[in-house]
Amino acid sequence: LMCRGPIGREAARLAPRGADQGIAGALVVYCAGCMQAVGARMGDAVGAINEALGGAPFLCIFTFGEQASVLGARARHGNLLISCTCLT
């Protein structure tokens, strides 16, 4: 798994065996506020997600008021978040 940042590295560390065989697909939750701020450069964000997933197909939804896990804590409400569930 190609992961950037502490959350990505922790996710890779906790990934079940077999995840190194590749990602079959992913479910992505992307903050709608971020999408609006990115505007015309949203294609760059899609390209970065595609690169991180190694070209695996993904389904993305855009939401307001995301919930996400924070290292060392339980899930919390946040804004301006992106999360990804990888399927192997």
Image: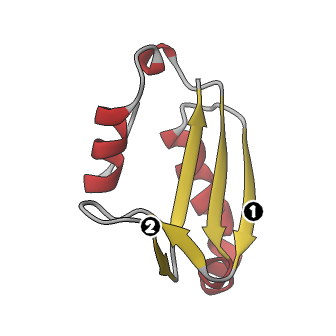
Q: Image quarter for residue 23?
A: top right
Q: Which mark is residue 33?
A: none
What residue is disc 1 on? Answer: 61
**Residue 22: % across, % down:** 52, 20
Kind of residue indicated by mark 1: Ile
Measuring 53% from the left and 64% from the top, which residue is drawn there? Answer: 82
Query: For the view shown, which residue lies furthest in the front direction?
Result: 74
The residue mark sitting in front, 1 or 2, is 2
Kind of residue indicated by mark 2: Ala
Which quarter of the rendering shows the N terminus? top left
Labels 1 and 2: the sequence-earlier one: 1
Helix, strand or loop at mark 2: loop
Q: Nearer the viewer, residue 49 or 6?
A: 6
Query: Left of 42 or right of it: where is 9?
Result: left
Q: Nearer the viewer, residue 63 or 43?
A: 63
Measuring 52% from the left and 83% from the top, which residue is drawn there? Answer: 79
Marks 1/2: CA–CA distance? 19 Å
Query: Left of 81 or right of it: where is 47?
Result: right
Query: Looking at the image, is 32 positioned above or below residue 61?
Result: below
